[in-house]
Amino acid sequence: MSRFLLRRLALGLLTLLLVSVVVFAATQALPGDAARAILGRDATPQRLAALRAQLHLNQSVFSQYGHWLSGMLTGNLGTSAASQQSVSSLLSGRIGNSAFLVFVSALVAIPLSIVLGVWMAMRRDKLADHVGSTVSLVLAALPEFVIGILLVVVFATNVFHSLPAVSLIPPGDHAWQHLNDVILPAATLVLAVTPYISRIMRGSMIEVLESDYVTMARLKGLPERTVIWRHAVPNAIVPAIQVSALQLAWMAGGVVVVEFVFSFPGIGAALVDAVGNRDVPVVQALTMIIAAVYVVLNVGADMATILLTPRLRTAGR
Amino acid sequence: MTDTALTPSAAPMAPVLRQRQWLATLRTALGFTRTRVGLLIFVVMVLIALLGPLFAPHSPTEFVGAPNSSSTGLFGTDTLGRDVFSRFLYGGRSVLGLAAAATAFGVALGVAIGLAAAYAGGVADEVLMRIADVFLAFPQIVLALLVVTAFGPKLWLIILTVAISHSPRVARVMRGAALQVVERDFVRAAEAVGEKRSRILFAELLPNVTSPLLVETGLRLTYSIGLMAGISFLGLGLQPPHADWGLMINENRLDVTVQPWAVLLPVLAIALLTVGTNLVTDGVARASIGVDRS
Amino acid sequence: MAAPGRTPVQIRELRIELSRTREDIVDEISLEIRAGEVLGLVGESGSGKTTVGMALLGYCRPGGRVAAGAVLVDGRDLSELADQVLRSLRGGLVSYIPQDPGTALNPALRIRKQLLETLETHTKLSEAERVQRMRESLGEVALPSDDEFLTRYPHQLSGGQQQRVAIAMAFACRPKVIICDEPTTGLDVTTQARVLQTVKELCRLHSVAALYVSHDLAVVAELADRVAVMYAGRIVESGTRDQLFTTPRHPYTQRLLRAVPDLAGKRTVLGIPGRAPLPGNRPGGCFFEPRCQLAVDACRQSFPAATMLEPGHQVRCYRAADTAAGVTADEAAALPGITAGDSVLEISGLKARHGTRETLFDIELAVSRHECVALVGESGSGKTTLARCVAGLHRDYTGEIRLAGAVLANSARRRSSEHRRQIQYVFQNPYASLNPRRTVGQTIARQLQLFFPGSRREVGSRVSQCLERVALSETAINRFPDQLSGGERQRVAIARALAAEPALLVCDEVTSALDVSVQAAIIDLLRDLRAEIGLSILFITHNLALIRNIADRVCVMTEGRIVETGTVTEVFEDPQAQYTKQLLANTPSIEAALGHA
């Protein structure tokens, strides 16, 4: 088993390395001169030359990549082209805010989806299941900014006026100090991911309920309670864990649009601003962070799957 | 000496001339109410997007009155004083066109990669899937933003990026579906008589995965619409003064309190289009389970 | 009527329907099983035998429902019991041994938990007593009961061990009734023999009334005291084991017995033409009438009632009085007396591997022109790997495979088109070997185009010829595989192979996915083809008895080696290798079972 886990971990690292190559290659292809982009049109040739040296722009692409990667690894994310601040100080507060937003959303969405999934599976093809399926289909289809704007229209601006339409969190404050401002963005994320996880849970539960071993458990005369919770759910939950990890990783990207809708001061809004300003170091740092979250969560989910599946856990013992 | 019901004396089976697989799937799908509703919504929205400009009372860029007025025209004017209804009628073509192009290209690429990986197996499969993993690590919108940062908001590049970001996702699904087919002995039979690899991929495997392909195409179209509208909504896709549903939301969202229609009309249009697509996709998915089991 | 204590199972006029269409799955089922008795319920696929077995547990598969009749277990009518009571009977009073323990044991729970939970639910034993009983039950099925074993998960056991765990679980609560649903399918013959022995002994030991559901007549002959034969949802004949196997009176039973290959080789197999009608498609009269050679007008009018021929022997047939003579047994027809010519296929020094594991060692084998060589072995013996090497589907081998003297390349892709044409492969499972998205005509036409390019019209007429050769009518051309029965599909697969006009036909377990009556028909066909076109065949099988009906020579394989080669008579009558002797002894056989009795 441990060999399998190590292999999975190594593959994760390899993926991250390749991701960094993609990020670097995509942004390095930027037409024009990064130093000029940072300093502006009327910079003196001396300052341009100095900055080019500082950014290693006059070295080969490979050594530029080497410098950039080692910077990433040591936490030196470079200097923002737009604000001239160090990227790490620019982003540290925002990363905390986004992490909090995702954490709150996951805390609500995952248990909710699993319970909903089991509940729909047990009422398969009854009215409750049909209603649940249709609602989740509709929600799953809606782009997250559409959900966000509809929530704003209903709860903030046009129907009720109970929640803020815009998350006005002053710089320096943390999101958890302004819970009122977190509710709508978090609700958007919850509505966006719950349909996915609950549908997977429903499907996997239905499959397990049709399995021979659940029939066998019933034919052994076990109480239905035991059949469901001891025989069915432990086998059905594994796919839900996988998809939960994927959805968590998706949220790391989904925050981009959701934060923009609510002007929530997190990494998503920062990314949109940076793209608008063509602030390369910030875009590089944020895409790396978001991709890393995906890789880490995926490796984590695979490990959880192995630990929860006896057949995999005991393999190679 | 025959065990067959196909001899003339035996009771004749119902004369069945079977349609192609995917047609049968679509037919079954249309038996579900949910799917019929979805199809209706989808068709209406597509017609609005395609034919809307013919019925627009004004040009989408024409200034017809005071900004954010609700008395001018059917749905008032937008934040710059243009007719909301006309911009709405014009704004669907770009969303639909971009999404359809990205879907078609992304699905085609994904199918080719997925089938090839499933059939090749071994090292080639491993390498293709690792490369797919790298692209999967970027949320689709983030990959699009990365490319916009590098090259600016060029439409063909955005289509290409969305398509490329679809392809590993499609490839994974198609590979999974094809793996079960690859195992089956009729593929061995084709190998034993020396069929070419390309023929095995597209004449033996592909016809057996049309149902997941149909479902995947529907799903990708739903997401493409959301993505394309989303990129415009962020202001990083189509640029003003173009009429586009995503862009309209971006332009008018700060005035939603005084002129809700300028935001709600495109929001509802995108919502209906994606919901319609998804309901049809779900019908196809449910139908294909039944069809494939028979 | 017998007292409930002595007759724990009584089924009266049971009818189970599809709840949606109201069509009957089974009807007019009446059975009794006494304590300590094993009743074999025999039928081909779709006959409804498992449905009857499940009804004894008060269980209907989704989509079905009990519409009439009564199932009495230990004197209690299951249909009158509340769900709660019914549940307390299942696993306690009536227990179940599943067909495939690989899927019926929960993969996420340890053996110990799965064994103990039945005892927790159904007995009032203390915890220590429960553990004691669990260990006792495992001992009864000859499994270890130490803690290491108990903490294992199902996937850490072999197929035979999994089935023993399932049996131990079924007997743990000391039930009065046990339902066995083909519990030895998928086990090799040696394991099967041991499992059958265990079930038999436990039923005697605990005086359990057992219903043994099976399609395998030989297994039932070894195990059952009484036998009931089902056909299309009805019991057509029932009697003691000896009555049923020595003096069968229903034409279906007679034909079914004639289809079973016989280890002693005294008779040839004979298939049953036509196929069993499905629910909703059953004729007005006797359901067997369309396939019955003895049918008269009365048979078309109504389904015959049961007649008692002698005590315990009932049959539902209007012609029962005329069937005493049995089917006129064909002579044990000699195999087509074609003299073998020069070698078509020669294999020498062949070694094969799967990854790093060696699976075949030093294989020497030859097939002459017009000869049929059988390759027999249990699962995992390497026989299919060998067949795939010959067809160029398993490339990882060393040594030589020669076709008419020429050495073949390892992979089919690198062989010449001519070589590929001359070796044709028929696969085990006809449900998987035909592309489900192509019609029969397209499948065969493709084969013809590959090897004999010609105009569309020519190909078209040759497709019909190919189908005719395997006794399929031209109407099959436009059918898709899923519109055909298993036997028809296998005929299409054979037609496709023959379309290439091969020198050698490799048949890999071609009948093992088919019912016994269909198997017999396919064997019939292959025999005819040998006589007609002088085909050479490499016939791979795990079924010893079949070999007598088709092959000239036999190679016995185990663990990747050929341990014995000889003519059929030599090997069957005077086996040399220890393994062959053991295989012959463990293979269930109707004749042997009756002889022992």
Image (tube, coloured by chain):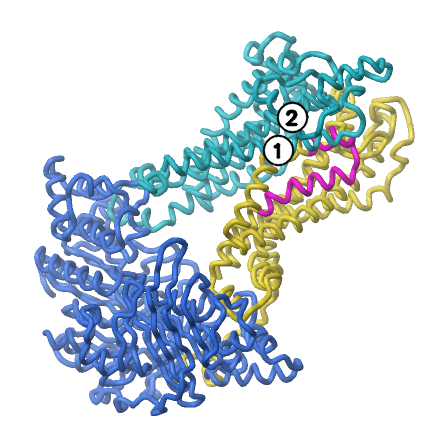
Chain colours: A cyan, B yellow, C blue
Q: Secondary structure at mark 1?
A: loop
The residue lying at 55 percent from left, 20 percent from top is A99
User: Is C540 in front, or is C522?
Assistant: C540
Label 1 crowd (10 A; few <14 / some 14-19 / many >=20): many
Inspect this view and state whether residue C43 appears: no
Q: Amino acid at mark 1?
A: Pro
The answer as to whether the residues below labels 2 and 1 share one chain is no
- The chief SS type of the magenta part is helix
Query: Which label number is shown at residue B139?
Result: 1
Q: Which residue is mark 2?
A: A256
Left or right of residue B241, residue C471 in this image: left
Residue at position x 21%, y 79% in the image: C572
Which quadrant of the figure has residue A27? top right
Provide residue C349's location: percent of width, then percent of height: 36, 69
- Residue B190 location, x and y as percent? 53, 67
Which three-letter amino acid code belongs to the residue tagged 2?
Val
The quadrant of the image that shows the N terminus of chain B is: bottom left
Using the image, determine if residue A259 lies above or below residue C547. Answer: above
